[in-house]
Every structure is written in C-alpha cells, then in structure tokens.
C-alpha cells in the first residue's frame, strides 16, 4: 500500500481536522480516542500523528469495528479518555456520551 501524506489523505476525505484540533485545544484534552470506519483505518496512524502534533495530545486508535455514530466504544472510562473523535460519513447529532465529549 502506498504511504500517503496527511495532505494527500485530506484531498481524498473531508476529515475536518481543523475542527477536531480546535476542539482538542478548547477542551484541553490530553487523551483522545480516535474511531474510524473500515475505509479510513489504513490511514489511521497518519491521521493520529497529525492530531497528536497539532493538538498537543496523546491518541488511542480504536481498532474494533465502527458501524456509525451509535457505535461508541465501551470501557473508555478506564483509559482516561477526555475526548472521542469519531470519523465517519454523516454528522452526529448528539454532543455528549457518558461525560466524554464526542465530535
């Protein structure tokens, strides 16, 4: 598989990284869980690195399946997660889940 840059990935997908990074900074999130649909998982480490560098945070890539906005990962409280960023195909209409903000 070709090694893509973040710029190449953003030309293919509208990741809204500026919005994600702005939210990380605004929330002062230190530990961010990233959840991807199957089609974006091959790029997850590149996206994660960009978020860590720009957001000054640590990330965890959730590798389990993600079937949409209602498919939030279980047990994240034990991981010290401050924020969940779920990359997907549609806007999610809920703002909070179990006291962890989701964007």
Image: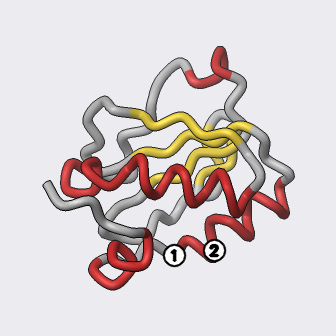
Q: Position of residue 90 (x, y in %)?
A: 35, 70
The label number, if any, that marks residue 96 in the structure image: none
Q: Is residue 49 above or below residue 72?
A: below
**Element at label 2:** helix
Residue 29's spot in the image, x, y percent?
Answer: 78, 46
Q: Is residue 37 left or right of residue 91?
A: left
Query: Element type at marker 1?
Result: loop
Q: Are marks 2 and 1 in contact (CB under 8 Å)?
A: yes
The answer to whether residue 80 is above or below residue 6 is above
Residue with the mark numbered 1: 16
Q: Residues within 10 Å of mark 1 (few under 14, many from 20)?
A: few
Location of residue 89 by image quarter: bottom left
Question: In what quadrant of the picture does the C terminus appear?
Answer: bottom right
Protein image colouring? secondary structure
Where does residue 27 sit, x and y in percent of width and height? 83, 55
At 60% from the left edge and 57% from the top edge, which residue is drawn? Answer: 51
Q: Which mark is residue 19?
A: 2
Give the vertical position of 60 relative to 18 (above or below).
Answer: above
Residue sticking out furthest to the bottom: 11
Which residue is painted at 78% across and 41% down in the image? 30
């Amino acid at each position: 598989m070709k090694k893509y840059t973040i710029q190449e990935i953003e030309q293919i997908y509208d990741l809204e990284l500026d919005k994600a990074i702005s939210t990380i900074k605004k929330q002062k999130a230190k530990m961010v869980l990233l959840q991807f649909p199957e089609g974006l998982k091959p790029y997850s480490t590149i996206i994660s690195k960009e978020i860590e560098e720009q957001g000054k945070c640590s990330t965890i890539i959730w590798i389990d399946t993600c079937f949409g906005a209602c498919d939030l990962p279980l047990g994240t409280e034990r991981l010290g997660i401050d924020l969940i960023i779920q990359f997907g195909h549609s806007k999610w209409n809920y703002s909070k889940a179990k006291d962890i903000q989701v964007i």
